[in-house]
Image (spheres, grey):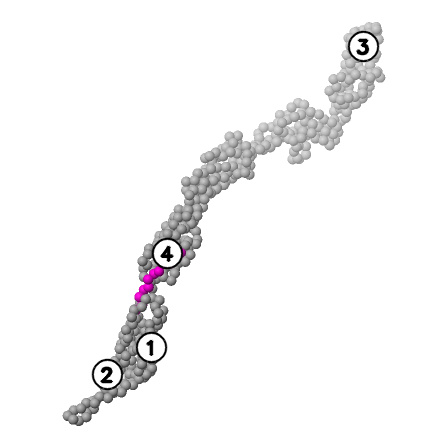
């Protein structure tokens, strides 16, 4: 609402009738004439102020008490002036459109006595100049919409930018998408194409769900021809699926091109990795599962040969070669070495013998083998026999003390009776007493003469 200060007008009307001067009744009437403004274009230079014409059509002075602007466009104008000279001027920076207001003058101090005039001002839309189009500043992943891509700017001084097909989901790569321009309310539709191809980046996506049919299989017990079928499926694109045994399971088994585990070589864990190859829109993907193979029971027991020992001493025993077995003398301490040392002499022991656990089987049940260390070794033997004499019968027994027993005597040549002038050799067989053995090399005499030792079995 705009106001002006009071103004008064004096108007005297004199009428001459029949040679006499007659004064008319006084009247008060003001008229207002609004100026006309030429239309401008958005971004205009502010027009100059224009005078408001106020005319007194009455017969006496009129006093203006108030000047105001009414209407939706009242704020688009400014009033200025004093005395009988008043101007109106459009304000600067209006948006495109037509602005109208009513100039209302109230005079002689009563709100019922007014004069009005309408004023208007038009701001036309400006032409849209050439401008720089925005670029895409973010990438999307295959499966996302173009609307998820951010433009470097979404508007400028002339309008706004948007994707023409925001719901499109392009393939991976570096395609283009169309951006469109919409002028704002102050600008005209441009005379050039209001659309533009923008380069975008669409990254390949992770594979959709790609997994084995049985991701957590139950354990299996080893058998010689064990197989396990478990294929992987899912994912996106046309990439093929390959299978491999994880490095941590190398040598444990093989896996076929269809995902079948075979050629199981040992018990333990077999880790299978399936790989879905990359495609134009998807990255490669892997899936993994673990199959536990438990050892089978070994239902065989070792056959103990006779004799079971290869050798023994007063402090040790050594079993004959039995491939695949292990031995235990104390508790569950097992050894594959067939020799036990540090034993007491002339003592009995129950040695447990079983097939040792393998990569595929548990250890077998055990067999108890009773053994005994030697009581001692015989390293000397002094034998006495009746010496040969012509005409005498050959002696058939010998004497001598030691941890051995005497066997029969054989003579060479085998004359009976002995003959004169003949050299005879007596062979005496000695056997060690229970749990005694002869040393491999011993000192032996017959009738104090050094004897030759042969066929010494150690017993």
Q: Report which residue position mark 2 lands on.
A: 57
Residue at 27% x, 80% y is: 54
Q: Report which residue position mark 1 lands on.
A: 79
Q: Report which residue position mark 4 lands on.
A: 162
Crowding at dot 2, Cα within 10 Å, few <14 / some 14-19 / many 20+, comes out as some
Residue at 47% x, 37% y is: 242
Q: Are marks 1 and 4 in contact (CB under 8 Å)?
A: no
Earlier residue among tags 3 and 4: 4
Query: Which type of secondary structure does the marked residue at label 4 adopt?
Result: strand
Earlier residue among tags 4 and 2: 2
Report the front residue among 228 and 255: 255
Crowding at dot 4, Cα within 10 Å, few <14 / some 14-19 / many 20+, comes out as some
Q: Are marks 3 and 4 in contact (CB under 8 Å)?
A: no
Which circle marks residue 424 in the picture?
A: 3
Which quarter shows the N terminus? Answer: bottom left
Magenta residues, as a range? Answer: 122-134
- Residue 292 in view in this figure: no
For marks 3 and 4, give the CA distance. 131 Å
Between circles 2 and 3, the one closer to the viewer is: 2
Q: Quadrant of residue 210?
A: top left
Query: Which type of secondary structure does the marked residue at label 2 adopt?
Result: loop
Residue at 54% x, 37% y is: 249
**Which residue reaches farthest bottom?**
20
Q: Position of residue 365 (x, y in %)?
A: 60, 31
């Amino acid at each position: 609402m705009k106001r002006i200060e009071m103004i008064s007008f004096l108007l005297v009307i004199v009428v001459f009738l029949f040679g006499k001067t007659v004064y008319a009744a006084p009247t008060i009437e003001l008229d207002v004439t609004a100026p006309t403004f030429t239309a401008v274009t958005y971004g205009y230079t502010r027009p100059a102020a224009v005078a408001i014409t106020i005319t007194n059509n009455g017969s006496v002075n009129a006093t203006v008490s108030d000047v105001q602007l009414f209407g939706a466009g009242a704020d688009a104008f400014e009033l200025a002036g004093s005395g009988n000279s008043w101007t109106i001027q459009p304000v600067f920076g209006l948006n495109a459109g037509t602005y109208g207001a009513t100039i209302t003058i109230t005079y002689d101090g009563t709100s019922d006595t007014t004069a009005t005039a309408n004023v208007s001002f038009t701001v036309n839309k400006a032409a849209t100049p050439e401008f720089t189009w925005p670029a895409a500043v973010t990438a999307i992943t295959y499966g996302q919409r173009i609307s998820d891509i951010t433009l470097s700017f979404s508007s400028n001084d002339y309008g706004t930018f948007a994707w023409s097909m925001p719901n499109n989901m392009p393939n991976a790569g570096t395609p283009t998408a169309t951006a469109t321009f919409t002028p704002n309310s102050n600008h005209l539709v441009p005379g050039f194409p209001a659309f533009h191809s923008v380069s975008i980046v669409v990254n390949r996506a992770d594979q959709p769900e790609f997994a084995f049919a049985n991701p957590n299989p139950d354990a299996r017990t080893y058998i010689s021809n064990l197989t396990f079928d478990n294929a992987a499926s899912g994912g996106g694109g046309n990439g093929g699926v390959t299978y491999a045994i994880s490095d941590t399971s190398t040598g444990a088994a093989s896996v076929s091109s269809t995902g079948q585990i075979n050629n199981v070589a040992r018990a333990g864990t077999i880790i299978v990795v399936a790989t879905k190859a990359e495609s134009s829109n998807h990255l490669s993907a892997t899936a993994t599962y673990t199959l536990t193979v438990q050892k089978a029971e070994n239902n065989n027991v070792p056959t103990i040969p006779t004799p079971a020992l290869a050798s023994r001493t007063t402090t040790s025993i050594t079993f004959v070669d039995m491939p695949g077995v292990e031995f235990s003398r104390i508790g569950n301490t097992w050894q594959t070495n067939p020799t036990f040392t540090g034993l007491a002499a002339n003592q009995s022991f129950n040695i447990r013998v079983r097939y040792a656990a393998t990569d595929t089987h548990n250890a077998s049940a055990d067999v108890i083998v009773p053994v005994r260390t030697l009581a001692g070794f015989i390293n000397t033997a002094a034998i006495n026999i009746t010496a040969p004499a012509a005409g005498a019968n050959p002696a058939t027994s010998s004497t001598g003390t030691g941890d051995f027993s005497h066997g029969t005597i054989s003579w060479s040549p085998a004359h009976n009776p002995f003959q004169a002038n003949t050299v005879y050799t007596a062979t005496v067989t000695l056997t060690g007493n229970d749990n005694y053995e002869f040393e491999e090399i011993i000192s032996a005499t017959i009738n104090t003469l050094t004897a030759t030792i042969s066929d010494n079995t150690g017993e």
